[in-house]
Structure formats: C-alpha cells, structure tokens
Image (cartoon, helix red, strand yellow):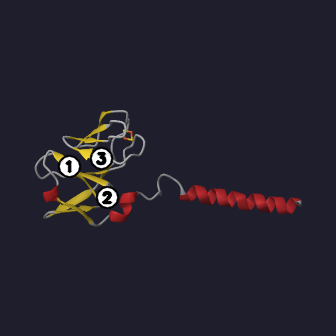
Amino acid sequence: MSRRRLLGAAGAAGVAVVGAAACTTEENRPQPQDALRGTVVAQTTDIPEGGGTIVIDGKLVITQPTEGEYKAFNAVCPHAGCTIQEVEENIHCLCHGSEFDISTGAVLAGPSQQPLEELAISVAGTDITLE
Ligand code: FES
C-alpha cells in the first residue's frame, strides 16, 4: 500500500472511530422509556397505596408511597440489568435480591450499589403521564 493510500485509510478509520464514539456516549444513549415520554403510562386507580405496580411491559415501576403521592422509576435494576419483577412494601429485583425504597428508589438491600433511576411524572385526574 502506498504511503498516501495508507494515510487515507488511517484518516477514514479515525473518522469512523470518532463517529462511533459520538453515537455511543452515556449522555445520548436512548433509554427504553424515551418512547413513552408525554404519554399516559398508568392509572392512579391501578397503583396500590404503600406499594406499586410494574407497567408498560416491565419498563417502569410506579409506586404510591403515601395516599395521592406517585413516583416512577426505571425498571432496569442498576446491579446487572435485570428487570424489576416485584413490588410490595419495597421494590424487589429477584435476580440477585436487591431491594429498593418505593419513595426514593434508594438501595435497601444489595448487591446493587446504585438506586433505581427516578423518572418525572405528572398526574391529571387518574392519568399518570411520563414527562
Ligand atoms: S440484577 Fe438486580 S439484583 Fe442483580
């Protein structure tokens, strides 16, 4: 390969690497719930007080820690990426046993070291909308 051709190939590879890096940063990586923003994801009447429900095919956890107070969390467990499977008085990931607080998403029991990601919602009537 000639020197000119070699440099051209190296330049193209560099552009490809820069382009790939720009598309895969944590900041701009699409999340499963992004497609749901601005849509009604649950009804308040389906969320038990002092507990919660997993909605939208396991993408979100909606809780009602106290009467009329609703919270939403990403249902992807921060430990190893399992989907949250159970909500009682706490949020449970049955894959390895992590438990999270229904009010804050904070870790109550490991192995997860990170809380669940809280998501903004609004409530109008009985509609819970993901912001
Ligand atoms: S993936 Fe949830 S506890 Fe391990």
Q: Secondary structure at mark 2?
A: loop
Q: Secondary structure at mark 3?
A: loop
Q: Earlier in the sequence, mark 1 or mark 3?
A: 1
- To which quarter of the image does residue 35 belong? bottom left
Q: Would you say 20 lies left or right of 2 here?
A: left
Residue flagged by tag 2: what amino acid is it? Asp
Residue flagged by tag 3: what amino acid is it? Gln
In front here: 112 or 87? 87
Q: CA distance from mark 1 to mark 2?
A: 15 Å
What residue is shown with label 2? 57
Residue count near mark 1 (Cα–Cα under 10 Å), binned few <14, some 14–19, many ≥20: many
What residue is shown with label 1? 52
Residue flagged by tag 1: what amino acid is it? Gly
Relative height, residue 76 to residue 126 (above, below):
above
Residue count near mark 3 (Cα–Cα under 10 Å), binned few <14, some 14–19, many ≥20: some
Residue drawn 25% across the image and 58% down it: 121
Residue drawn 48% across the image and 51% down it: 26
Quadrant assignment for ligand 1: top left
Residue drawn 37% across the image and 33% down it: 111
Question: Which corner quadrant holds the N terminus?
Answer: bottom right
What residue is shown with label 3? 85
